[in-house]
Amino acid sequence: MSYLSRIAQTHASIDLSREELAYYARHILLPGVGIDGQRKLKSACVLVVGAGGLGCPVLQALAGAGVGRLTVVDGDVVSVSNLSRQWLHRYAECGQNKATSACSTLCELNPFIELVAEPRMLSRENAHELIEAHDCVIDATDDLDARYWIDDACAALDRPWIHAALYRERSQLTVFWSRCGATFRKLYPEPSGAPTCSGAGMLGASASIVGNLQALEAIKLITGNAQPKIGELVSFDAAGLSLQSFKMPEVDMPECIVTDGAARLSERALSVFALQQARSIHEPMALLDLRSGSDFEKGTIPGAIHYTDEQLLEDGLPQGLTGKVILLCEEGTISAILAEALSSKSENIYFLEGGLVASNSIK
């Protein structure tokens, strides 16, 4: 089963706790992500090969984004020379395995995800086994042979993988997916033609930029919020801060399912004007003010009930409500998140656009 099929089938059943809603609040507000996209991220499993200059920013970004399970493969140990660019590792961890060290730090960053350390190198013999349980793979290694093994295993298992390579101030990035005709072997039939950064100098800031771009491509693949760079080679020159893009020949781009999070949220939104109209004809509704008790006492829309966001998430909607349920908060941000989060449980739940700040004209 490809990652698209598996995530599509499982993400709808994934629940986000109140703590997770708070942690991912800024992601959920993004068009194209929303609650649906955050659930997809939580249901995803990503394999990151390498916990070095690329792997550290990739892992930090994906852990912060809420990828549900991250597996880190690296048989190397932390050395002093790594610390200037591999920022998940600490001086006191020199001599420890990099996969274990990275997972230890990531546990402190996000307690809501699963982290798996594989303290071994990816090889021809274990590539299929390691990749099979994951939805996509990120190449954060400087081992040229490993890239061919990743390419072969991903082709056999129908998995996309995100490649990047660094050489001093220059780097390249692309997404390979054999079902589209985009493979590493097609781009580099002979090993001598592929770049490697082994033994070359590298600034941590440059590696961080490219690693974060890899993480963005993984997020695109998982959420479907934008078109990933499948079969398109992006070249980055850190010295000149320039990007160039080259399309690979004979790549059949798939139609990516792009979900508009803004459209989803708009279905739950109720404007101040629409609320005024509904009240003028005495349409049945319940207004739930989610702010603190002190803010509620300072003033709210007449008829609103004080019911905090904690109560809503822990206990659900109050019993006995009829008609539309409209959530209120100060500026409409928290109520929008909660309306989307609870929309699967109630078709009649909405939030007031602009919140109480926009409602001054309502009496």
Image (tube, grey):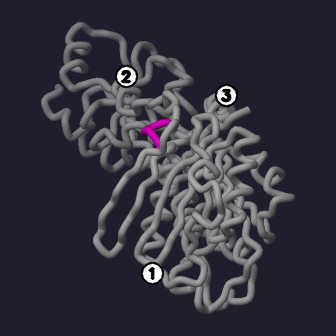
- Residue type at the position of mark 2: Glu
- Which residue range is magenta in the image? 224-228
Task: For the C terminus, give its image quadrant.
Answer: top left
Residue 19, image x, y percentages: 55, 51
The verdict on residue 94 being magenta is no
Gap in angstroms between the C-alphas marked 2 and 3:
23 Å
Give the amino acid type for the residue marked by disc 3 in the picture: Gln
Residue 229 visible, this orientation = no
Residue pointed to by mark 1: 203
Where residue 267 is drawn, which disc sits there? 2
Mark 1 or mark 2: which is in front? 1
Say which residue appears at 63% left-offset and 54% top-offset: 189
Which one is nearer the viewer's eye here, 287 or 53?
53
**For mark 3, what is the residue?**
9
Q: In this view, does 85 lie to the left or right of 358?
A: right
Q: Say which label, 1 or 2, has the lower sequence index.
A: 1
Of labels 2 and 3, the one closer to you: 3
Residue 113 x %, y %: 65, 55
- Of labels 2 and 3, earlier in sequence is 3
Residue type at mark 1 is Leu
Give the numbered dot on residue 158. Answer: none
Of helix, strand and loop, which mostly describes the magenta segment? loop
Give the CA separation, mark 1 to mark 2: 46 Å
**In terms of depth relative to the viewer, which is nearer, 31 or 283?**
31
